[in-house]
Every structure is written in C-alpha cells, then in structure tokens.
Image (cartoon, coloured by chain):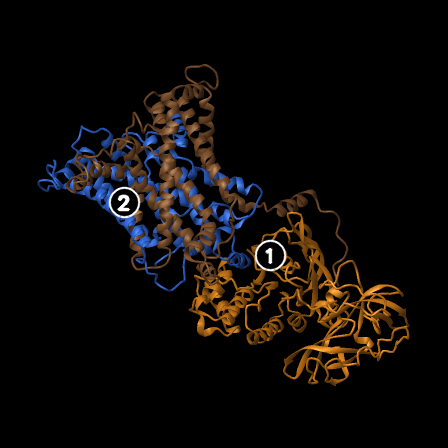
Chain colours: A brown, B orange, C blue
Amino acid sequence: MTGGAATGRAPTGLSLRHRLAERGVDGQLLLLVPAMVFVIGLFVYPFLYGLGLSFQPTKGGGAFADYQRFFSDAFQRDTIWKTLKLSIPAALFNVLASVPIAYRMRGRFRGKRLVTTLLVIPITLGTVLTAEGLLNFLGPAGWFNRTLMSLGLVDQPIRLINNYWGVFFSLVITGFPFAFLLILSYLSGIDPSLERAAATLGADWRARFRRITLPLLAPGLATTFCLTFVLAFSVFPSAILVGDPTGTTRVISIAAYQAAYEQYDYPFASAIAMIMGAVELIVIGVVLLWRSRFYAGSTGGKG
Amino acid sequence: MSTPTTFRELRLDGVGRSFGGQDALQGLDLTIRAGEFIALLGPSGCGKSTALNCLAGLLPLTAGSIWQDDKRVDTLPPERRGFGMVFQNYALFPHMTVRNNVAFGLQMRRLPKAEVTRRTEEAIRLVQLEEHVGKLPGQLSGGQQQRVAIARAVVLEPSLVLMDEPLSNLDAKLRLEMRTEIRRLHQSLGLTTVYVTHDQEEALSMADRLVVLRKGSVQQVGTPEELHNRPRNWHVADFMGFRNLLPATVAEVRDDHVVVAVGGLRLAATPMVPLSAGDEVVVGVRPEDLTVASGGVTGGGSPAYGSSTGSGTSTYAAEATIEARVEVVEYQGREVAVEARTPQGVRLHLRTAERLAPGDTVSLAVAPGALLAFARGDEALPSGAPVLGDASEPATSRDGVLATTGGEVS
Amino acid sequence: MTTLNPTAPTTATGTRRRIVASPGGWLVWGAVVLFMVFLVGIVGSVLVNSFGTRWFGTWLPEGATTQWYSQAWTDFSLMSVIIVTLEVAAAVVVLSVLVGVPASYVLARRDFPGKKVVYLAFLLPIMMPPITYGIPLATVLYKFNLAGNITGVILANLVPCVPFVILTMTPFIEQIDPAIERAARMSGARTFAIFTRILAPLLVPGILASSILVLVRTVGMFELTFLTAGPDSSTLVVALFNSMNAAGIRAQQSVDAMAVIYMAVMMVLLVIALRFVNPTQLVAQVKEEPEP
C-alpha cells in the first residue's frame, strides 16, 4: 500500500535544494537581475559614489569640511529653509484643497472625464512651460493684472513673478492636479456602502465624513502629501525662471546645481545633494510615522 | 522533448513541503500503480493541494523524493515530467480559442502540424465540444470550460493526470454529470489519475483508493469500502459521515465488543483499536445508523425522560435505547434530518423516515456494529465538547454540546 | 477600450450625483473654475504671444504672424532637437519595458528573502528628487565619458523609468491567474514560451499603458536630461529652458513659439496616452507597499 522505508539519506546537494525551495529561491529570480543591475549601476553606485565624494572636499580640511562649509555659510544653509518654506505650504495647500473638491466629485457625473483630463494637462506640460506661461500671465502687463486693474481692485500691477509667489503658483498649478487625482482615486476606493451604512445609523454628512471617510482616507492623504512634497521639494526650473534665484527662492537644488556646474566643485555639490536627500527623507519619515498610527487595511472598495 | 513514457508505478517517498518552517505536508508515502484512480481527500488546508502541486512539480519539495519506477522525477521541472493537470478554476488561456488551448501542449512538444491537428480534433471530439472549437473560453459555460480543461490535459496522453478539485466550481447537477464523465474517460483511456477533493462522496464514488489527509499528514489510505466501514481514527470517521462523535469511557471489554459509558448511557461498541477498561475513547455513529425504536410521542415536558439511563443498574444490552427529545427537524425529501438531545444534554443527529416534530420524545437504538470506538488522542473534539463524568452522574448542563458535525468541511 | 487599469475605481453607485447643491458646492466649483482660468491664462498667453507681432500694454497683440515659428525653428534648430527627443524617448521606453517587465513579474508572483529591500531599491529612485541623485549620477557618467551625449541622457532617464515600469506592471501581472501559467507549464511550456505565448499577449494592454506613461515622463523630464545632456543631446524641454534662461538674446515671442511646439508635442502624447489609460493613472501609479 504505502511506499516503503526511506531510501537512505539525501545527498547534501539535494538537501540544499530542499532548503532553498523552502525559502522560495530558484532560477526564476534571475529575471530580477537586469533590473537590479540597472538600479545598482545607475542609482545605488552613483549615490554611494556621491556620498564618498562628499567626504573628499576639493579644498581639503577633513572629511566633513564640505558639510561644515554648507552649514556655516548662511547663504547656503538658508536654502534648506527656503526650500521647506516653499514646498511644505505648497504641498499642504494642494492636499487640503483637494480633499473637499475630490469629496464632492467622488461619484459619477457628466463631464468627470473632461475635468480630470483638463487637470492632467498641467502635469503633462511640466514646470518649465508653466513657468513660461506664468511669466506672461501674471506679469505686470499680463492678463491677470490687467483684469484686476480694469476691475479697479488695484491701482498698479501687483508683483506676482520673480518672487516667492511666482514659484508658489507654479507649484500649485502642477501639484494640485496631481494631489487631486490621487485623492480622488483613494476616495473612489472607499466602499460607498460604508457611508450609507453610517447614514442608516443616523449620521449626518458631517459625521459621516469625520467618522468614516476621513479615517479611511488618512493613510492616502499622508501618501499624497509625501508625493506632492517630493515634487515641490525638488523644485528647480521654476525657482530659476519665475522665482528670485539669487534671493528668496534660492532653493537647495539651485545651490547644488551651482556648486556642480558653475563652480565645478563636485564634492561640495554631492554634499549638498546628500543634505537635500536627507532633509526630504526626514520629512517623509515623519509623515509616514504619523500615518502608521492609522488603520491601513482594506477600505472595502476597489481601487 | 520526448513524449513521456508511461510507468509501472510512481512512488512518493517521504514527500514533504514546508513554508517558512510551517509544515504544509509531511511524510507522504504512497505508491501509485499505473491505471489507478487515487483521490486525495481532506478538509481545506489539509495539504492535499500542496501534495498535488508537489507531484506536478509546481512546488519544489522540501523533503523526500518522487520516483517513477527507477527514475527520480522530483528534480525535474514540471514541463519535463510529462504529467497533465486540470485546475480548479480551469485556468484556460483566455486569449486562445478552444482549439488553440487544446493544441498548445502539442505545439510545445514541437509535434508535426498534421499530428497536432489530428490529436486536437480527437480530444475535442472526446469531450463533445466540436461546435465550440473557434470560441474563446470566456464565451463558454462553466461545464464547457471544464471539458476544454480536461481535453487540454488528456490530449498529451500524459503518464499521470492530476486533478485539483475540478468540479468544485460547478453547480450540483453538472457536478454529478461531470463526475460520471471523468470516470468514463478514466476507464476508456486508462489514465492514471490523482484527484484532489474535499467532497467525500465524490471521492468514494470515483476513486479506486483514497488518501485521507489532515493537517499535512496522512490519516489513512485504503479502498472506499475500507474507509467507509473501518475508519482508522475519529478524524477520518468525522470525514466519512460519522456526524455523532461523543467522548466516552470504556466500561468493560467483551469478546468482540466493548461497553462504553457515554453521557449517562452504556452502549455496546465495536473497538477500532485495542482497548481496555477505563480508556478514554471517542465513539461515533452515522445519523442513518441511529434508528428510532419508538417515537412520535407528542408532548411538552414529557416525563419519559431518562427511562433507561440506568443509574447504578447496568443496561449492557446492545438494544439499549436512548431517550431523546427532538429539537430541530429538517425536511429532506424521503427522510428528515433530526437533531435531538438527551436529558443529559448529549446532542444527537439522526435521519429517519418517521414524521417527527420538535418537542417529540423518541427512543433511539444503535446496533453495536454501527457504533465505533476510537482512541481519543490528545486533540479535543472539533466542537470542544466537555468530557462527561461517570455514567451514574447525569450531566447538569443543558448546553453541553457533545456531538460534532463535520463543520470544518466546507 | 475605455480603461485598462486593473485597479480602476469603479464606484458602482449607478446614480448620478448632483454636484451643484449647496454653498459648499458653489465654493468647490468656484475653486475649480479659478484653477481652470489660471490654466487657460497660462496656456493662452503663451499661445497668443507666440502668434503676436507687438504686444505692449494692450489686451491682445497688434497683429498676428507666424514668423516667430520659422525663426524659432531655425534659431533653435528644432528639427534636430525633436529628433533627439524622440530617439531618447523611444530608447528609454524600449529598454525600460524590456528590463522592467521581467522584474515586475518576479515581484508580483514570488516571495523570497530580501523582497522588501529589492522593492525599496525600486521605490527610492521614484521617491528621491532627481537633482539629488542626478548630480552624483552625472558625475559618474562624465567620469566614464558617458554623459554629454545621447547615451548619457538615455541612461539617466532610465533611472526613474525602469522602477516606474516595474511599479505600474506589477498590478497588471497580479491580476493574471497564476494557474494559467501553471497550466502552460504542465502542458510543457518553458519559462521563455510562457513569457512569449501566454504572458505577453495578456499583458499587451498593461505594457502599452506603461510605455505611454514612460514616454510622457521622458519627454517631460527636465532635471536628469538637463544634468547629463550636451549641446547636441538636449531634448525639447531642456532646449526650452536654456532659451528662456538666456533671456534677452532671442525675442520673447520666439521662445513662446518654441514653448507652443513643446506643448503641441506633449498634447499629442497626452491624447494618445488617454486612449490607453485614464487620467488618474497618469499620476496614481505608485503602489505604496509590497504585498506581505
């Protein structure tokens, strides 16, 4: 009936095979190799190379000389605050403005696809073109100021470009649609019958939003904030074009770029890039830590 | 790639598979002879699908080996073992027509075009799908998809066909038809088959031999008769339709039977393992083997309770009757399924042709040959029944659920 | 072909909700309209300026002309810039699909030690600002004489695009029943045949979607191209930035003409993209965490 006694001990090669099989390792994993080679060769290695370079300052003075130089020079150090002062308010604005609008539009209605398509346009165009348009539109002789003046709201053109606000507007124009579409897809992923269930239990729309939708949406909000923040934090072309690249909008990426391509000081540029990455990861880390306190399981819907 | 040759026997030798330290299957020894129909039977999560996938080569083993006559095959990838497989949800290629689905395996073997066409048509004729050759799987009904899946597996003339719960997605009527169909194909083609199912009726009716699995290890291997009449332990009995499983104590050992004390009763039972007086056992009886000796007595608080619960005086006779009160009646056509409870709180399931109603008092009898006694083992009965005290002490709790159902079988 | 997104939100409420209902509703619509006004203003003023003759202190230019286009075309040698742009984009699309799809297959189907680390390695290039890794990357590429030409631009653009393809393809692969591959294997197909005969046909929609998204991203990618491009290997967006930044040398209208050409290229891509994906997919591709 049942097979007989075991036929001796398995040779070592086979028991290794058994051990690997248990951990899920076999030849199919080789399919990962090309992508890993790419990521290691073009991302990890350059990153580590830059990290190493940042500890070998051109002007000598010890491994941390370039970092000291960055933090002791107010002109350089302040780029961190300037960047955060632009990117955090812009990202917050984009996320917070998106929530009520997306909440209103989460159902199906005529023209939804048109609205979402129009919103994709600025994302597709990117910051360079947005900057060019803002220069024309918000400039002293642009349509915006002309409208304000002919309505009698202002006496002379308000200055909206080549300063903080120009960059802020460009971050909103490209960042808001991004945040909105993300939040819309998170909201559509929440099973609508949950809200209906809450309604049958006597919750008005305010309570439904606060007690049901918002808690389920919170992880999505955190993720959206992170992604929008990354976009805003790496602001570069618009800070140069519509901003004030020597003053209020001298963001950290400008500092890094100038070190590399104007002073040809690659170690210093790498040090700035590393600082930039570290600051970004700290902000994201804080947000994700906050996020981990929320329920993060299924939200019942699809999406 | 050579066409697979058939074998005399396929030997599984201590086959095991674990996932991150958890054994999904362990120590499976089994010899499959050519032409046999073997069913792997067990509740979900018992390791039967793991066993099938290991056999197919879709899951690498973590212990043991598989031999085809004298050739070791567990080191071969699935595509080189020459086995065929039918999947639970059919797994038809959604972008290929019925014809191309069936022809796929032949094309992979690089057979001449004429032969591919001939054998594909033959297989499609075998499953009676000639009119649907040009359709995509999405345009077929469940039963037709099932036939395509079978044709796709058998067209390769595999040395072994593996079937993974192939009928579980079909409705009841179609399932019965396909059962016959598969059995017919097996007989006409003589294909060695390993069939996985959780439906014991399906397994008993189709297979030459059954392998009952539980928690990754083999409980019993045998013919349908052996399993049906002599389950080796109460887990197998549970699976073979012994819906009434009660904890009991051996009171006395006789020549060919034992007397057990169960819930205030003394009943004659057939021991399935050597037992001695005082042993803790589990006794089991099928609902259809509990016969109604007299019943249909209507009445609310009937005084007839406990007439033969012989406190002190022993009622060893096999004809001892059990008084119980009917609680739930399910109409099932010719018969009714009844749930009744004894005054001691033992819940019993029975089937009878008599028209009973809730509240009726019945006296039940069980033949000694139908009441089987198993070693209890360490594990609690599935419903976590409390172990009853001595036969002389009537249980007080009315909620003491003693009987078990095959509840974990879906 | 309306949507090919496997995780497309399908709110099957069936009822059309009334949007305009309350003061809150008006506020929401007001915000949307304001945004659209800005959008139209931005795009419109570029467009108008590029066709205008002289435009000082009036609502519209004095007259219309197309001379700026011919001027921009020759001054910025736009023909060769567009050719470079298309070459870069095509190369990036093909390479990132070839490299990314097999990797996303493994991530979608398999569990193995270190999967989370691998996943993180693919996530980071998308999460980090391009400047952060772009500067060290450009330094390395210059060291190996790979930057300053089209090769460098392609390599740099692959850094975010390969992970992007991996992350967009994973849900497409996850929705294919693994039993289909097992069935193919049981029919005697090897890994290569499974990829070409079974997976590739089933994945065509997903591959199309992620290719078009990579195309849009590559044509629009400024930072990485800017850092690695030489004079002959600038893409359209970098050439646009350079001409804007060197203000004063060229007439503003000429720069705007170039901006319109860039816009037109992007709009064509967008229209093509929207045939294969829905608008949300253009942004909402990042799956946050690996399957446990």
Which residue is nearer to you in this view: B22 or B25?
Answer: B22
Q: Where in the figure is residue B348, as x and y percent of width and height?
A: 74, 73
Same chain for the residues under marks 1 and 2 in the image: no
Tell me which corner region of the image, top left, top right, bottom left or bottom right, holds residue A139. Answer: top left
Q: Amino acid at mark 2?
A: Met
Asked if residue C233 lies left or right of residue B253, the reply is left
Q: Amino acid at mark 1?
A: Arg
Which residue is nearer to you in this view: A47 or C44?
Answer: C44
Determine which residue is flagged by label 2. Answer: C266
Q: Secondary structure at mark 2?
A: helix
Asked if residue A94 lies left or right of residue B32, the reply is left
- Which part of the image, by quadrant, shows the N terminus of chain B? bottom right
Which residue is nearer to you in this view: B382 or A208?
Answer: A208
Is residue C7 visible in the rendered image? The answer is no
Which residue is nearer to you in this view: A163 or A275?
Answer: A163
Q: Are marks 1 and 2 in contact (CB under 8 Å)?
A: no
Q: Secondary structure at mark 1?
A: loop
Q: Residue at x 54, y 43 (%)?
A: C115
Q: Where in the figure is residue C87, as x and y percent of width and height?
A: 31, 40
Q: Where in the figure is residue A150, as x and y percent of width and height?
A: 15, 41
Distance from disc 1 to disc 2, alpha carbons, whole Å, reads: 53 Å
Q: Residue at x 57, y 62 (%)?
A: B85
Which marked residue is nearer to the observer: mark 1 or mark 2? 2
- Which part of the image, by quadrant, shows the C terminus of chain B? bottom right
Determine which residue is flagged by label 1. Answer: B81
Q: How many marks?
A: 2
The chain under label 1 reads B
